[in-house]
Image (cartoon, rainbow, N blue to C red):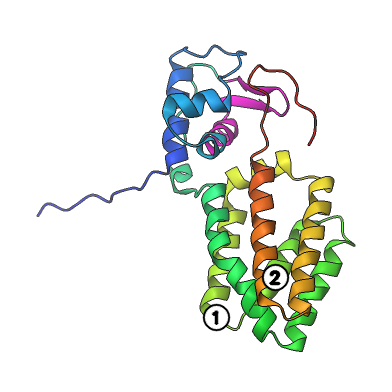
């Protein structure tokens, strides 16, 4: 009896990366040459710049390009470069993950402000304080968000937040993007944003807590969307 074959869902950024990789293998973009800017690629492919950003990071992981922040993206692979491994097809893009967090975590913060127990709120404060005292703020960043989710009083929401964080940690594209755009200065900004969230929760103000968490996640999105380089290839100053 004939059976159906499994249908693989290919992420948009993966489709974009495969198309650019094909052009590189065909020699349309010579080794050592600079790729068109993110804006130009987005216009040509009729997709968002966020999807282009994810595709370029994926191509760097696969060895096709080199990202030089402040300058641009340059071809490194030869035309014989191998196609992307199948496992990469299942990787969810960083911006999809962050947008999903934006739907859930602001409500978790609002509920935590309303329903969190003194012990749960103390755990949120402890995670926030620990982030400022460590050389590895990423761990305490997750602890802060996880503590808020735990304090929301809804196990399904808390599990959803944990799952989204696990997907982020498992994403090589997300990890590489953070390597480029998350530094000591960025962690200081994130810590200040966390302080506003914590202050609202301590005040038992759900509206302010929701808005503070939303603003924090918007800030993360904006920081990860910093340009690799100006459209004319000139070096861009730090923001």
**Looking at the rendered structure, which numbered label has been put on residue 208?**
2
Total marks in image: 2
Q: Name the residue at 47% across, 26% down.
A: 43
Relative to 9, is 156 above or below?
below
Q: Is residue 104 visible?
A: yes
Q: Name the residue at 80% across, 52% down.
A: 189
Left or right: residue 77 compared with residue 128: left
x%, y% of residue 9?
Answer: 36, 48
- Between the C-alphas of marks 1 and 2, the distance is 23 Å
Report the magenta residues as a range: 54-76
Relative to 190, is 158 above or below?
below
Relative to 238, is 174 above or below?
below
Return the residue nearer the eye: 60 or 198: 198
Return the residue nearer the eye: 148 or 26: 148
Residue 53: name its quadrant. top right
Q: Name the residue at 58% across, 71% down.
A: 107
SS under mark 2: helix
x%, y% of residue 68?
Answer: 70, 26
x%, y% of residue 109?
Answer: 65, 72
Q: Pointer 1: residues within 10 angstroms few (<14), some, or many (20+)?
A: few
Residue sticking out furthest to the left: 1
Closer to the observer: label 1 or label 2? 2
**Looking at the rendered structure, which numbered label has been put on residue 155?**
1
Residue 16: name its quadrant. top left
């Amino acid at each position: 009896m004939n059976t159906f074959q499994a249908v693989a869902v290919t992420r948009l950024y993966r489709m974009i990366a495969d198309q650019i990789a094909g052009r590189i293998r065909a020699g349309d973009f010579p080794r050592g040459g600079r790729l068109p800017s993110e804006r130009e690629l987005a216009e040509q492919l009729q997709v968002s710049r966020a999807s282009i950003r994810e595709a370029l990071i994926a191509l760097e992981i696969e060895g096709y390009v080199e990202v030089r922040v402040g300058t641009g993206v340059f071809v490194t692979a030869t035309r014989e470069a191998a196609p992307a491994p199948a496992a990469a097809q299942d990787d969810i893009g960083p911006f999809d993950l962050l947008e999903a967090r934006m739907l859930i975590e602001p409500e978790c913060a609002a509920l935590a402000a309303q329903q969190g127990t003194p012990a749960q709120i103390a755990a949120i404060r402890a995670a926030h304080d620990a982030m400022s005292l460590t050389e590895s703020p990423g761990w305490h960043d997750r602890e802060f968000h996880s503590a808020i989710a735990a304090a929301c009083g809804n196990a399904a929401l808390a599990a959803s937040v944990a799952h989204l964080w696990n997907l982020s940690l498992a994403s090589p594209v997300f990890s590489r993007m953070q390597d480029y755009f998350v530094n000591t200065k960025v962690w200081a900004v994130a810590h200040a944003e966390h302080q506003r969230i914590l202050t609202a929760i301590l005040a038992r103000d759900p509206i302010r807590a929701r808005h503070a968490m939303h603003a924090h996640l918007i800030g993360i999105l904006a920081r990860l969307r910093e340009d690799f380089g100006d459209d004319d290839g000139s070096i861009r100053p730090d923001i």
